[in-house]
Image (tube, helix red, strand yellow):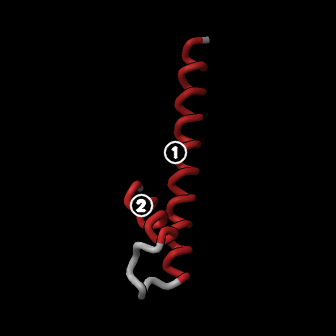
Amino acid sequence: MLTFVGLTVFHWLGWTALNLSENQTLALLEIVRIGLGGYVVGRSVEKATIAWKQS
């Protein structure tokens, strides 16, 4: 996951290969967005489960 974030940041800073197309960049951003969403949902479920077990 951090690799995709790093590639995205490097592209924004201009440190990537010149042959990287806009579609490839958007695909990387989509992967980062899906991964971040999965992380947020996973953490929420984890906290809700802990609260449910304690009550």
In the image, 45 versus 22, the foreground residue is 22
Tell me where residue 26 appears, x and y as whole percent: 56, 74
7 vs 46, nearest the viewer: 7
Q: Which residue is situated farthest in the bottom direction here?
A: 19
Tell me where residue 36 appears, x and y as whole percent: 54, 51
Give the residue type at disc 2: Gly
Q: From the image, which quarter does the N terminus lie in?
A: bottom left
Per the image, the residue denoted by label 1 is 39
Q: Residue type at mark 1: give it.
A: Tyr
Q: CA distance from mark 2 to mark 1?
A: 17 Å
What residue is at 54 percent from the left and 21 percent from the top?
Answer: 50
For label 2, the residue is 6
Q: Position of residue 12 (x, y in %)?
A: 52, 69
Left or right, 50 with reference to 20: right
Question: Residue at left 48%, top 68%?
Answer: 13
Is 50 on the left-hand or right-hand side of 19?
right
Where residue 54 sits in the image (x, y, percent)?
56, 12
Q: Is residue 43 above or below residue 8?
A: above
